[in-house]
């Protein structure tokens, strides 16, 4: 999946979970956490595989359930210990939805079930590491653009646009949580001396 798809799917799932569990939309902190966690596996694996050639694939360490489950468990335990589980649930939803999306994407696009990466290193990842990220990214984008030129690709593009539009609509309905972190704070009024 592409980053915007991961973020959109994770936000929709977390917004629904937040309303179900706490009866209210996501908080600003939780919205930022779910967005970050939805990208975290790629933020770990892609640089380590594509730029540093430390990992065999862009879907290995951060995408493995052998890493994800303990990391999510620690996050949930930390939230419980603090008495505030909203951000830790947001983390869990974001992280785990990323993994689910990376299983769903090749199934939808290529009709292939590729889930072996979920058990890396027990199931070895295909060699995909490279020390030059730009050519690899160009290959991925090129293949995606060619796919979009097919009838199935056009349908995918419509579904992708619907996913992103739904996430934006729900985010706006939720009060645009996270946006205030991007806005500068208004200046403090000057105090009179006197």
Image (spheres, rainbow, N blue to C red):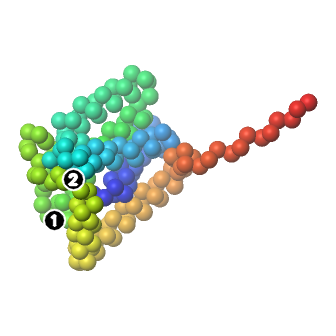
| Quarter of the figure with the N terminus | bottom left
Relative height, residue 43 to residue 145 (above, below): above
Dot 2: element:
loop
Dot 1: element:
helix
Residue to which mark 1 is pinned: 110
Relative height, residue 177 to residue 169 (above, below): above
| Quarter of the figure with the C terminus | top right
Relative height, residue 18 to residue 137 (above, below): above
Q: Residue visible at 43% across and 24% down?
A: 83
Location of residue 136 in the rendering, given as x and y in whole percent from the top left corner: 23, 61
Q: Is residue 59 visible?
A: no
Q: Residue visible at 15% across and 47% down?
A: 56
Residues 29 and 85: in front is 29
Location of residue 48 in the rendering, given as x and y in whole percent from the top left corner: 24, 45
Residues 10 and 124: in front is 124
* CA separation in Å, label 2 and label 1: 27 Å
Location of residue 17 in the rendering, given as x and y in whole percent from the top left corner: 38, 42
Residues 110 and 193: in front is 193
Q: Residue visible at 21% across and 35% down?
A: 67
Looking at the rendered structure, the number of numbered marks drawn on it comes to 2
Label 2 environment density (alpha carbons within 10 Å; few <14, some 14–19, many ≥20): some
Which residue lies most toward the top here? 81
Q: Residue visible at 21% across and 53% down?
A: 131
Name the mark nearer the viewer: 2 or 1.
2
Residue to which mark 2 is pinned: 131
- Looking at marks 2 and 1 on the same chain, the residue that comes earlier in the sequence is marked by 1
Which residue lies most toward the left here? 123
Quarter where residue 77 is shown: top left
């Amino acid at each position: 999946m592409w980053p915007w798809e991961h973020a959109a799917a994770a936000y929709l799932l977390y917004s629904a979970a937040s309303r179900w569990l706490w009866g209210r939309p996501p908080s600003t902190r939780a919205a930022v956490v779910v967005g970050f966690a939805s990208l975290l596996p790629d933020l770990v694996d892609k640089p380590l595989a594509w730029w540093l050639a430390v990992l065999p694939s862009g879907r290995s360490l951060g995408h493995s359930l052998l890493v994800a489950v303990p990391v999510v468990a620690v996050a949930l335990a930390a939230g419980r210990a603090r008495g505030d589980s909203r951000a830790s649930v947001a983390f869990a939803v974001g992280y785990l939805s990323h993994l689910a999306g990376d299983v769903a994407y090749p199934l939808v696009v290529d009709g292939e079930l590729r889930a072996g990466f979920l058990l890396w290193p027990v199931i070895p990842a295909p060699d995909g590491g490279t020390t030059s990220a730009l050519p690899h990214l160009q290959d991925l984008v090129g293949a995606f653009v060619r796919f979009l030129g097919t009838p199935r690709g056009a349908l995918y593009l419509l579904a992708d646009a619907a996913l992103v539009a739904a996430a934006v609509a729900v985010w706006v309905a939720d009060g645009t949580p996270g946006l205030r972190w991007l806005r500068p704070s208004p200046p403090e009024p000057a105090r009179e001396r006197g």
